[in-house]
Amino acid sequence: MKQNKIRAIKLSERVTIFKKSDLDAFISSRIIDEVEK
């Protein structure tokens, strides 16, 4: 039971990290767009 909980936490952490890097990529592309105008 405890191991399943740990695995679920690790999975959600991975999803959060992925979403954060996705967001960072989006923000940096927006900044580049603003600079190039």
Image: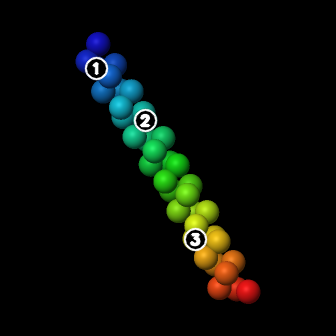
Q: Earlier in the sequence, mark 2 or mark 3?
A: 2
Vertical position of residue 31 compared to residue 17: above or below: below
Residue kind at label 1, given as amino acid type: Gln
Q: Residues within 10 Å of mark 3 (few under 14, many from 20)?
A: few
Q: Residues within 10 Å of mark 2 (few under 14, many from 20)?
A: few
The residue beneath circle 2 is: 12
Secondary element under disc 1, as helix, strand or loop, is: helix
Q: Residue at x 36, y 34 (%)?
A: 10
Q: Nearer the viewer, mark 1 or mark 3?
A: 3
The residue beneath circle 3 is: 28
Q: Position of residue 13 (x, y in %)?
A: 40, 40
Q: Position of residue 24 (x, y in %)?
A: 53, 62
Vertical position of residue 25 compared to residue 37: above or below: above
Q: Residue at x 63, y 70 (%)?
A: 29
Q: Position of residue 28 (x, y in %)?
A: 57, 71
For marks 1 and 3, give the CA distance.
37 Å
Vertical position of residue 15 compared to residue 3: above or below: below
- Whether the residues at callouts 1 and 3 have beta carbons within 8 Å, the answer is no
Q: Earlier in the sequence, mark 1 or mark 2?
A: 1
Residue 16, disc = none
**Number of marks drawn:** 3
The residue beneath circle 1 is: 3
Q: Is residue 4 left or right of residue 24?
A: left
Q: Nearer the viewer, mark 1 or mark 2?
A: 2
Q: Residue furthest right?
A: 37
Asked which quadrant contains residue 11, the reply is top left
Residue kind at label 3, given as amino acid type: Ser
Residue kind at label 2, given as amino acid type: Ser
Q: Residue furthest left?
A: 2
Q: Residues within 10 Å of mark 1 (few under 14, many from 20)?
A: few
